[in-house]
Image: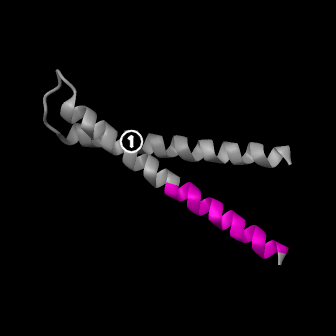
Amino acid sequence: MIEQQGQNVDQAWATRRRKAGITAFLVGLIATLAFFAFFPGLPHVIDWGAILVSLAVGALARWACQSWMTRAAEKKTERR
């Protein structure tokens, strides 16, 4: 019974981590596209370069969010 509860907690944590990663990716993607679309001085057109950079920023944001969550969970586990 205790092992099953531990698995449920791990699964819930993995689900939260995955949802946070998806959210971070979308926020990074949309923020970068908005930057390229509305920042003064840049041509106001979204080209393939802007799309690729936005995807890269989204992936970086996802990686940063998930690594931060993993590090925080490890620190929490060490304290116990």
The stretch drawn in magenta includes residue 10 = yes
Q: Is residue 7 left or right of residue 55?
A: right
Q: Position of residue 42 (x, y in %)?
A: 17, 25
Q: Kindly tell me whether residue 72 is visible in this rendering.
A: yes
Residue 18: horizontal and vertical position, in percent?
A: 53, 58
Image location (x, y in percent) of residue 5: 76, 72
Residue 62 sits above or below residue 2 on the image:
above
Dot 1, crowdedness within 10 Å: few (<14), some or many (≥20)? many
- What residue lies at 33% left-to-right and 39% top-to-bottom? 31
**57 to the left or right of 38:** right
Q: If the image is split into quadrants, where does the N terminus sit?
A: bottom right
Q: How many marks?
A: 1
> Residue 39 lies in what quarter of the image?
top left
Q: Residue at x 76, y 46 (%)?
A: 76
Task: State the residue position of label 1.
Answer: 28
Please give the name of the residue rendered at 63% of the width and 65% of the height, measured from the top-left corner.
Answer: 12
Q: Position of residue 74 (x, y in %)?
A: 74, 46
Q: Residue at x 84, y 44 (%)?
A: 79
The amino acid type of the residue labelled 1 equals: Gly
Q: What residue range appears in magenta?
A: 2-19
Examine the rendering and report whether any part of residue 55 can be seen. Answer: no
Residue 43 is a magenta residue: no
| Furthest residue toward right | 80
Q: Main secondary structure of the magenta part?
A: helix
Give the residue at the far bottom of this rendering: 1
At mark 1, the secondary structure is helix
Rendered image coloring scheme: one colour
